[in-house]
Amino acid sequence: PIVVDSPHSWRDWPAMVRTVASTAALGSAWDAYVDELWAYALDHRAPLLCAGFHRALVDANRARDDIDPLLLAGVWPTPLHPSEKSRRGFGLIRRLALPDVPMYDGRLSVAEVEARIRDLYDPYHQKLTTLIDDCEARFGYCLHLDCHSMKSVGNAMNDDEGTKRPDIVV
């Protein structure tokens, strides 16, 4: 009775989306090989949902309204609730690839951000909800594992900058 998801497994930036961030900077946002590790471990015995889009494009592990107002070229139609992560530049849609490394050469239109949420974030969460609901219907409960990898030491984008991290976090 397990559902596993890996919301940061996609490493490729879409060619049609403009960014000023380098390939190396974009690569720092990828949870390297987490999807492959879990696919091997599960061996098709439980569902594994992996994001098919880059984490910096839209982060499936953030709240839908965790949008940095500094990212927007217009006024968002509903109230926003930017978290501390948004204020640091990496909320639902990243403003920064790394500390002091911008993602874009300007602000994004409200329509572009809405499209990313509608076309990527919402379908991911709808699929995850369906998998969890199906698991609960079959087994009476569901263990949801949201899987990630981490740098061995926190950097300036994290709240534990310079701190050595554990090898495994459950």
Image (cartoon, helix red, strand yellow):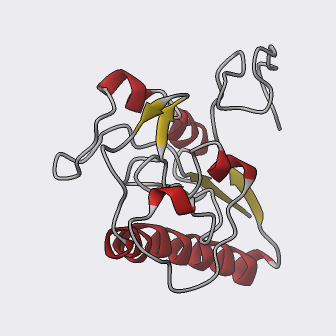
Question: What residue sits 72% from the left and 22% below the top?
Answer: 154
Number of marks drawn: 0
Looking at the image, which residue sits at the far left? 16
Question: Which corner quadrant of the image does residue 46 belong to?
Answer: bottom right
Taking 99 as reference, is 113 above or below it? below
Taking 146 as reference, is 12 above or below it? above
**Position in image of residue 38 (x %, y %):** 57, 40
* Quarter of the figure that contains the C terminus: top right
Q: Nearer the viewer, residue 159 or 87?
A: 87
**Position in image of residue 54 (x %, y %):** 40, 47
**Position in image of residue 165 (x %, y %):** 79, 19
Question: What residue sits 57% from the left and 44% below the top?
Answer: 89
**Position in image of residue 39 (x %, y %):** 51, 42
Query: Is residue 12 rendered to the left or right of residue 45?
Result: left
Q: Nearer the viewer, residue 42 or 33?
A: 33
Taking 82 as reference, is 30 above or below it? above
* Quarter of the figure that contains the N terminus: bottom right
Question: What residue sits 72% from the left and 84% below the top?
Answer: 137
Query: Is residue 117 rendered to the left or right of residue 155?
Result: left
Question: Which corner quadrant of the image does residue 133 belong to?
Answer: bottom right
Q: Is residue 29 visible?
A: no
Question: What residue sits 64% from the left and 81% below the top?
Answer: 79
